Amino acid sequence: MIRAVLFDFIGTTVKEANTEVINTCFEKAFADNKVLADISVLKSERGKDKKVIIENILKSQHLSLSLIGNIYASF
């Protein structure tokens, strides 16, 4: 059964019933790759391209950008 469909268009705002879904997915994707992503940082990055968000968080923690693909895939 399909429970949700998300169309992610750059520059488009989607109203979510649960506004934490995207942040929770990001937190899990980072955790899957042994990276701690603070929820307040994720919220401040909201609206940016997902790979840019991942890159910004990795750079802020001085971690390898080679993790971008894995984190993105986990997301």
Image (spheres, grey):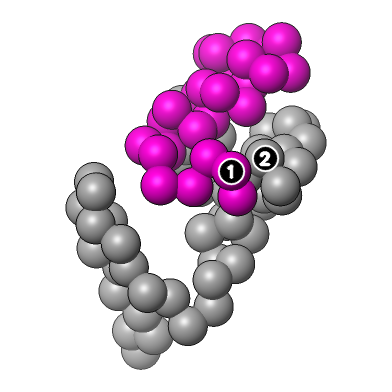
**Residue 32 badge:** none
Q: 74 and 11: which one is in front?
A: 11
In the rendered structure, which segment of residues is drawn in magenta?
43-68
| Residue 19 x, y percent position in the rendering | 54, 71
| Residue 46 x, y percent position in the rendering | 49, 47
Q: Main secondary structure of the magenta part?
A: helix
Name the residue rendered at 74%, 32% in the picture: 35
**Mark 2 neighbour class, 10 Å CA radius: few under 14, some 14 to 19, many 20 or more:** few
Q: 37 and 29: which one is in front?
A: 37
Q: Quadrant of the N terminus?
A: bottom left
| Residue 48 x, y percent position in the rendering | 40, 39
Q: Is residue 14 left or right of residue 39?
A: left
The Cα atoms of the two marked residues, 1 and 2, are separated by 5 Å
Asked if residue 60 is among those painted magenta in the image, a careful observer would answer yes
Considering only vertical position in the picture, is 20 above or below 42? Answer: below
Q: Is residue 32 visible?
A: no
Task: Check disc 1 and give the amino acid type.
Answer: Ser
SS for dot 2: helix
Q: 58 and 72: which one is in front?
A: 58
Q: Which residue is mark 1?
A: 44
Q: Is residue 54 left or right of residue 7?
A: right
* Furthest residue toward front: 44
SS for dot 1: helix
**Mark 1 neighbour class, 10 Å CA radius: few under 14, some 14 to 19, many 20 or more:** few
Q: Label 2 near label 1: C-beta < 8 Å?
A: yes
